[in-house]
Image (cartoon, rainbow, N blue to C red):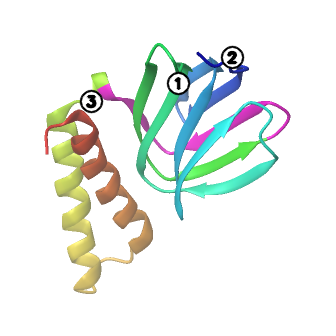
């Protein structure tokens, strides 16, 4: 049993914090792959993609809170990690119908962009599609 130091972790959306507290490990979906952080990690700033964010409050006991998160940014500084994301849904709270509706709406708008009927931002739409798909994956209902 390792003695892991805890550090402050915040997972924040535009609506407010999805998680705030101490954790032993946080794993976020970095643009180039997953980023795992322990206490005393070197300062870091990274871009996040839609994916699974896992906050381990007790690694050895398997106490983890998993979230389906949208794109955003991640910063580690002085034993504090902050993930700013456009959406965070706790895995146990994922609404299957909401996720499917978000997926359909984003795919329809993306099709309009491809036909030249919309000037919406393609990258944002692609991220919305990935985030909705991710919610369904994280919930195990794909």
Whole-percent x, y for residue 142 in the image: 14, 45
Q: Is residue 121 visible?
A: no
Magenta stretch, overall SS: strand
Magenta range: 77-91
Q: From the image, tell me which residue sits under label 3.
A: 94
The earlier-in-sequence mark between 3 and 1 is 1
Q: Which residue extends farthest right?
A: 78
Dot 1 falls on a residue whose secondary structure is strand
- The residue mark sitting in front, 2 or 1, is 2
> Residue at the front extreme?
1
Q: Residue at x 66, y 56 (%)?
A: 46
Q: Are marks 2 and 3 in contact (CB under 8 Å)?
A: no
Crowding near the residue tagged with mark 2, few <14, some 14–19, many ≥20 C-alpha atoms within 10 Å:
few
Looking at the rendered structure, the secondary structure element under dot 3 is loop
The image position of residue 89, as x and y in percent, is 38, 32
Q: CA gap, disc 3 to disc 1?
A: 19 Å
- Magenta residue check for 80: yes
Name the residue carrying label 1: 56
Q: Identify the residue at image location x=77%, y=40%.
A: 41
Quadrant placement of the N terminus: top right
**103 and 7: which is toward the camera:** 7
Where 39 falls versus 113 (above or below)?
above
- In this view, the residue in front, 64 or 93, is 64
Decide which of 82, 111 is in the foreground and name it. Answer: 82
Residue beneath label 2, please?
3
Mark 3 crowd level (few <14, some 14–19, many ≥20, 10 Å Cα): some
Residue 5 drawn above or below residue 99: above
- Mark pair 2, 1: CA separation: 14 Å
As drawn, 25 above or below 83: above
Dot 2: element:
loop
């Amino acid at each position: 049993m390792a003695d892991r130091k805890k550090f402050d972790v915040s997972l924040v959306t535009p609506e407010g914090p999805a998680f705030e507290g101490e954790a032993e490990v946080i794993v976020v979906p970095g643009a180039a792959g997953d980023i795992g952080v322990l206490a005393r990690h070197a300062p870091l700033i990274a871009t996040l993609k839609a994916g699974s964010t896992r906050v381990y409050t007790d690694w050895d006991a398997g106490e983890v809170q998993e979230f389906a998160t949208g794109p955003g940014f991640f910063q580690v500084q002085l034993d504090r990690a902050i993930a700013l994301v456009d959406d965070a849904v706790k895995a146990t709270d994922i609404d299957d119908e909401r996720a499917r509706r978000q997926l359909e709406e984003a795919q329809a708008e993306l099709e309009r962009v491809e036909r030249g009927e919309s000037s919406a931002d393609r990258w944002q739409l692609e991220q919305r599609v990935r985030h909705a798909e991710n919610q369904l994956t994280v919930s195990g209902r794909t």
